[in-house]
Image (cartoon, rainbow, N blue to C red):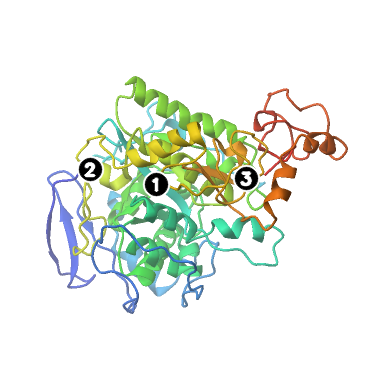
Amino acid sequence: MLISSSLLLFSVALKANAATITTSSYLAQVSPVFPSKIPTPSGVVTSYQDGPYDTVSSLDTTPLEGFPTTWAIPPTDSDEVQTIYNSINWNKVPSAPVRKIKSDGSFSPNSDGSSDPYCYWSDTNCVKPKASYLPPDLYECPKKGDWGLTYDDGPFNKVSTSESYASLENPYAEPALYNFLGRKNLHASLFYIGSSVVNYPAAARLALNNGHSLCVHTWSHNPMTTLTNAEIVAELYWGIKAIKTATGVTPKCWRPPQGDVDDRVRSIAWQMGMRTVLWNEDTNDWDMPDPMNGGNLPPKTVDGYFQSWINAQKAGTLKTGILVLEHELNHMTVNMSMYWLPKLQSTFNVVSALECNGISQPYWETNFVYPVSDGTTTTTTTTTTKATTSTTTSATPTSSPTCTSGSFGLENGDGYNGYCCETQADCIDDCISGKCNGPSNTKTTSTTKTTTTKTTSTGASSSCVAGYRGKRKGNGPTGACCSSSDDCIETCRKGICGL
């Protein structure tokens, strides 16, 4: 999947130290140039560092300065954007139409016809550009058994404590996911929104320090084919510069929001130094119900996706590896990923999306050289798998012989942090390697045992909605009576459906 290329100095009006990639068939690719000087960041590595990694309890929340308004399409008339705009060979940018946003602000892709002249992914899932001078998108792990781990929309910022959902979301904001991955020495390709990086640059630095590959996900997360050429340049430029300012690296990779890309957008991104990365499997985790982002997809449906991929891998029916779309968007998406990763590790070779595609240098800074996948499915996670198995037998995981009894296998959803668990239904939050994570127990042991008795179900009937308990239809709304999570859209907590 690597493009055969050579690095040479490119000395024209752009800058004397810019690098150019040339091939026999692809358009010359120029490293991004920043018209204004970017200070060298501190507290960040200058080359790839393998794990294991230290975890951190908190991160500095000081934002970057000197950037456009966050979460809005940047102005196109700034000197910086105009410099980049004028460096692009517009004769090599296909004249695909600017797509339309509906009056209500939503985006629904149209069609360019059966010939699909602009390789419009949103309509046809096309990943091989019709413009012969552009490389194909990266969208799968070529080798069977590889699981290409990616997360969009990060870094996950903490929300203001004035928000009603802050206590629910903030425990899952960074560094939560990066700590989790660091403890397991796992790496992901992270597709960052520039606005999120500017607001939380310390999280981006932690990700780079922990061996993740950083890629661009635009500045404000708008569908790219709905933007003018100048707006596309502005979105990509400020997304690149945010990562460069925070971490010191200049990504060669990007992913379009919603996968919305055609050859017009691809050419602009390629000429700005980045190759397009998509996916071949989608968790749709972004659509799970969450007070911060909304959503309607039952978590059990997402669970089903993960289980189906595991089943297919075990059955030998997958033709390639999987490059999956996940998000570090809210507590639901992060929790879901934490729950499934140990199970995926026992079945797949979990690596970053760039690693499984043989991309060893994801930045224009050549001092970063990452490992690449050898295609084997050998993992170092058998200890985790055995721990889960032994928990099922004895309620005492071998990885931690000190888990607390009282919740294992009861599906009461009341297991505090450190309690033994068989499945997620045993815990207030999640079951990881045979132990609940989430909030700690502030009650006495005897009080905890009392709450796991059947009195919960009778007491709940007076304060929950009847008609769902024991039906196992997965349709119980928040507040419905339940005996297990199979009764609920989300999860059964102490006899009542909810988050």
Q: Which is nearer the eye, 396 or 117?
A: 396
Q: Where is residue 16 in the image (x, y as percent from the top left)?
A: 17, 73
Amino acid at pointer 3: Gly
Crowding at label 1, few (<14), some or many (≥20) Cα neighbours within 10 Å? many
The image's mark for residue 415 is: 3
Q: Name the residue under label 1.
A: 150
Query: Residue farthest to the front?
Result: 446
- Where is the N terminus found, in terms of image quarters? top left
Q: How many marks?
A: 3
Amino acid at pointer 2: Ser
Q: Which is nearer the eye, 461 or 259?
A: 461
In the image, which is nearer the foreground, mark 3 or mark 2? 3
Query: Residue farthest to the right?
Result: 462
Could you tell me which secondary element the residue under label 1 belongs to?
strand
Q: Where is residue 280 in the image (x, y as percent from the top left)?
A: 38, 34
Which one is earlier in the sequence, the residue at label 1 or at label 2?
1
- Where is the C terminus found, in terms of image quarters? top right
Q: Which is nearer the eye, 290 or 404?
A: 404
Q: Which is nearer the eye, 183 or 396?
A: 396
Q: How far apart are marks 3 and 2 (CA)?
A: 38 Å
Note whether 446 is above or below 43 in the view shown.
Answer: above
Q: Which image quadrant is residue 479 in?
A: top right
Q: Name the residue under label 2.
A: 373
Which one is earlier in the sequence, the residue at label 3 or at label 1?
1
Amino acid at pointer 1: Thr
Crowding at label 2, few (<14), some or many (≥20) Cα neighbours within 10 Å? many
Is 40 displayed left or right of 77 in the figure?
left
Q: Where is residue 158 in the image (x, y as percent from the top left)?
A: 57, 63
